[in-house]
Image: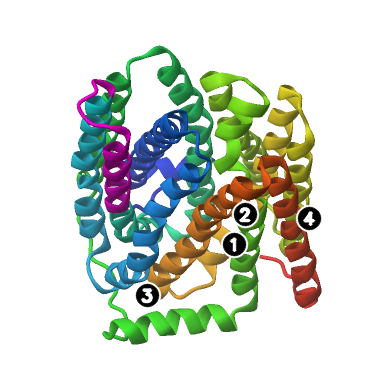
C-alpha cells in the first residue's frame, strides 16, 4: 500500500490501485445504468405493465439477498481481491447473452414471453454475481489506500458513482433514442470488459484472517455488532425505510411516458437528475464535511427527501419534476456520505466484508424492494397516489427515528 501520497484533494489517486479500482467502478456504473435503462424502457414499451419494472429489480435482488451474506464471509475468509476479479469477469458473457436475447426479439425470432423469461433469468445471474462482488469491492478500499486518506477515498468513490449516475442515464437515453439496440448492448459489453481488465491490473496482496472460521458464527457476530452499535443500526434503518417508501426512481418510466410525455430522452434526464443533485452536494461536502452533529444533519436531509417525493408526485411541469429529483438526490447524498463514513471508521478491519455485505443488503433492499412496492401500489392505486402514500410513510419513519435517537444528536466524527 502506498504511503507517500501528498495531502492534496487528488492525493488518493497517487495510489495506483485506487485509480484502477475507480476505473472499474466507473465502467461498472455506466454499464449497469445504461443496461437498466434499456431493459426498463424496452420492457415497459413491450408490456405497458408497471409491474414489470418492479420485477426487473426483484430478479436481481433475490439472489443478491441470498448470496450477499456469504459473499461477506468469503471476502473476510479468503482473498477478496481475487474473488472480486473472478466474479466481475462473469458479467461479460451475461451481457452478451442479454444482447442476443433482445436482438432475437427485434428480428421476430422469439416472442415477448420468451424475451421476458430470458431477461429475468439473466438478471437473476447478474444478482448472483453482485452478491459476491459487492462485499469484496466495498471492503477492499481500506487495504488499498493509507488510513489518513480513507475519507478522501470514500468521497471520491461516491463522487465517481454520482458523476457516472448523471452521465450514464442521459447517454443511455440518447443512445436508446438514436442508435440501434445492438449498438447499445455492444457498448455495455465493452464497458464490462474494460472494468474487468482494470481489476486484473491490481497489485497482488494478502489480507488479515478473521477470528471465527464458522460462516454462521461469523455472520451472527457481524449482526450482533450492528445491533449493539446504535448509530450504525439506525443509519441502516433510515436508509431502508426512507428509500423503500419514498423512492420514485422505479416509476420514472411511467412519469416520463404517461404523465410528463417527454419520451426516452426526457426519461434519461429525469433518471440522471438525482445523481446531479448528489454530485453538487458532494462537491460542497468535500470542502465542508458534516462532522458536527452529523446525525441531526442526516435526519434533516431525509426529511427533505420525503417532502420532495411528495411534491414530485403532484407536479405536472417537467422542469419542476427535474428540480425536485435534483433535491432528492442532494438530500440522499448527505445520508450516503455520513453512513459510509460511519461504516468505514467504526467497525473492526477483520469484519469489514461482513458489515459491507449487511449494509449492501439494507441498501439494495431499500432500492429493489422499494421498486417492487411502488410498482405494486401503482398497479392498484395508479402512480400519483402510490407516491403520495409512500412519501408520507417515509416521513413517518424519519419522525420515529428522531424520537428513538435523541442521544445521538450531539454525536460527531
Could you say which disc has been placed on residue 240 in the image?
1
> Of the numbered discs in the image, which one, if any, rests on residue 243?
2
Colour mapping used in the image: rainbow
Residues marked 4 and 1 touching at CB (< 8 Å): no
Mark pair 1, 2: CA separation: 6 Å
Q: Nearer the viewer, residue 207 or 240?
A: 240
Q: Position of residue 261 (x, y in %)?
A: 63, 21
Query: Label 2's element?
Result: helix
Work out how far the residue at label 4 is from the one at label 1, CA to CA, in angstroms. Answer: 16 Å
Q: Secondary structure at mark 3?
A: helix
Q: Are marks 2 and 4 in contact (CB under 8 Å)?
A: no
Instruction: Determine whether 112 is above or below 226 in the image.
Output: above
Q: Residues within 10 Å of mark 1 (few under 14, many from 20)?
A: many
Q: Quadrant of residue 178?
A: top left
Q: Nearer the viewer, residue 51 or 121?
A: 51
Residue, x 33% and y 54% (percent of image)? Answer: 127
In the drawing, what numbered circle is on residue 350? 3
Q: Nearer the viewer, mark 3 or mark 2?
A: 2
Cα–Cα gap, marks 2 and 4:
15 Å
- The residue at the point 65 percent across, 36 percent down is 277
User: Would you call the spot at circle 3 few (<14 residues within 10 Å), some (14-19), or many (20 or more)?
Assistant: some
Q: Is residue 384 visible?
A: yes
Residue occupied by mark 4: 300
Q: Position of residue 77 (x, y in %)?
A: 26, 74
Instruction: Provide residue 31's location: percent of width, then percent of height.
Output: 36, 35
Magenta span covers which residues? 106-126
The one of 144 and 2 positioned closer to us in this rendering = 144
Q: Quadrant of the C terminus?
A: bottom right
The span from disc 3 to disc 2 (Cα, nearest Å) is 29 Å
C-alpha distance separating marks 4 and 3: 33 Å
347 versus 295 height, above or below: below
Amino acid at each position: 500500500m502506498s504511503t507517500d501520497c501528498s495531502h492534496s484533494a487528488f492525493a488518493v489517486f497517487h495510489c495506483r490501485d485506487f485509480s484502477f479500482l475507480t476505473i472499474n467502478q466507473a465502467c461498472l456504473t455506466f454499464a449497469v445504468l445504461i443496461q437498466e435503462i434499456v431493459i426498463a424502457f424496452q420492457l415497459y414499451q413491450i408490456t405497458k405493465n408497471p409491474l414489470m419494472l418492479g420485477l426487473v429489480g426483484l430478479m436481481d435482488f433475490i439472489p443478491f439477498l441470498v448470496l450477499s451474506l456469504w459473499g461477506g464471509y468469503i471476502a473476510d475468509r479468503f482473498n477478496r481481491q481475487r474473488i472480486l476479479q473472478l466474479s466481475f469477469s462473469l458479467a461479460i458473457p451475461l451481457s452478451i447473452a442479454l444482447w442476443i436475447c433482445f436482438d432475437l426479439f427485434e428480428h421476430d425470432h422469439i416472442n415477448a414471453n420468451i424475451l421476458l423469461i430470458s431477461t429475468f433469468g439473466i438478471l437473476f445471474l447478474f444478482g448472483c454475481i453482485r452478491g459476491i462482488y459487492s462485499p469484496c469491492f466495498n471492503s477492499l478500499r481500506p487495504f488499498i489506500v493509507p488510513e489518513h486518506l480513507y475519507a478522501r477515498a470514500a468521497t471520491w468513490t461516491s463522487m465517481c458513482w454520482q458523476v457516472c449516475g448523471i452521465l450514464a442515464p442521459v447517454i443511455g437515453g440518447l443512445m436508446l433514442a438514436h442508435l440501434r439496440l445492438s449498438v447499445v448492448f455492444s457498448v455495455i459489453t465493452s464497458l464490462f470488459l474494460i472494468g474487468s481488465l482494470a481489476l486484473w491490473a491490481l497489485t497482488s496482496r494478502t489480507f488479515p484472517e478473521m477470528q471465527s472460521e464458522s460462516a454462521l458464527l461469523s455472520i451472527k457476530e457481524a449482526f450482533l455488532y450492528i445491533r449493539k452499535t446504535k448509530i450504525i443500526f439506525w443509519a441502516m434503518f433510515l436508509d431502508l425505510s426512507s428509500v423503500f417508501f419514498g423512492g420514485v426512481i422505479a416509476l420514472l418510466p411511467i412519469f416520463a411516458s404517461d404523465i410528463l410525455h417527454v419520451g426516452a430522452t426526457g426519461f434519461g434526464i429525469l433518471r440522471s437528475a438525482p445523481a446531479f443533485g448528489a454530485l453538487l452536494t458532494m462537491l460542497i461536502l468535500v470542502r465542508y464535511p458534516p462532522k458536527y452533529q452529523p446525525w441531526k444533519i442526516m435526519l434533516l436531509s431525509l426529511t427533505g427527501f420525503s417532502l420532495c417525493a411528495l411534491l414530485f408526485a403532484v407536479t405536472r411541469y417537467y422542469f419542476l419534476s427535474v428540480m425536485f429529483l435534483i433535491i432528492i438526490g442532494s438530500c440522499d447524498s448527505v445520508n450516503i456520505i455520513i453512513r459510509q463514513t460511519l461504516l468505514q471508521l467504526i467497525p473492526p478491519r477483520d469484519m469489514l466484508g461482513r458489515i459491507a455485505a449487511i449494509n449492501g443488503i439494507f441498501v439494495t433492499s431499500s432500492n429493489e424492494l422499494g421498486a417492487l412496492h411502488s410498482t405494486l401500489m401503482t398497479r392498484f392505486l395508479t402512480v400519483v397516489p402510490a407516491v403520495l402514500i409512500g412519501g408520507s410513510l417515509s416521513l413517518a419513519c424519519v419522525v420515529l427515528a428522531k424520537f428513538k435517537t435523541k442521544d445521538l444528536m450531539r454525536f460527531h466524527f
